[in-house]
Image (cartoon, grey):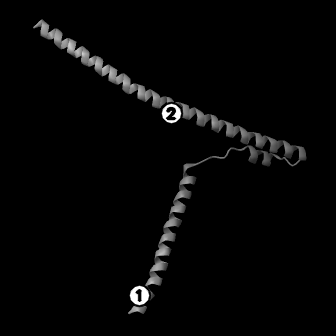
Amino acid sequence: MSKELEQKSAALEEALAKQLNEIKKGSEDWVKVGAIVGVGALVVYGLSRLSSKKEEKTTDKALVVLEREGLLNPDIRERLTQTKPSSLWTGLAQKVLFLGLALAKDKLYEQFFAESAKPEENKDL
């Protein structure tokens, strides 16, 4: 009986070792995917920081030129330095508007061509 138990325990240990090896192989793939996503996020973050720095520099240059010319007042300074809020609704509203225009255009085309096709059918009769 003890031999049977030893054989079962050895078989269970082998099965456990195989399962651990499979988990390690599967986790290697997830680690690779995670690393790719992380590197991509860092690249996008770096590019966005670079582009924002360029915008700040052009704004700073414009402020210096306006100040030198004597045209800079507090209202203009506020407008140039104020951050523009972005909203999900703005882009969504534009997309819905263009979708509505496209659907309306399709309906108008259907009506236009349907009306022009009907008189031709009547002429044949």
Residue marked by disc 2 = 37
Q: Residues within 10 Å of mark 2 (few under 14, many from 20)?
A: few
In the rendering, at what x and y percent does residue 65 appear? 85, 44
Q: Residue furthest right?
A: 69
Q: Give the alpha-carbon distance from disc 1 to disc 2, as whole Å.
A: 61 Å
Helix, strand or loop status at disc 2? helix
Badge count: 2
Q: Are marks 1 and 2 in contact (CB under 8 Å)?
A: no
Position of 13 relative to 54 (above/below): above
Tell me the quarter of the picture where residue 21 sits: top left
In the rendering, at what x and y percent does residue 14 appear? 25, 16
Position of 49 relative to 5 (above/below): below
Quarter of the figure that contains the N terminus? top left
Q: Residue furthest left?
A: 1
Amino acid type indicated by mark 2: Val
Q: Residue furthest top?
A: 2
Residue at the (46%, 31%) spot, across then down: 33
Residue at the (37%, 22%) spot, across then down: 24
Residue marked by disc 1 = 121
Position of 72 relative to 3 (above/below): below
Quarter of the figure that contains the C terminus? bottom left
Tell me the quarter of the picture where residue 60 sits: top right
Q: Could you tell which of marks 1 and 2 lies nearer the N-terminus?
A: 2
Q: Observer-nearest residue: 5 or 77?
A: 5
In the rendering, at what x and y percent does residue 101 appear? 53, 66
Helix, strand or loop status at disc 1? helix
In the rendering, at what x and y percent does residue 61 appear? 81, 42
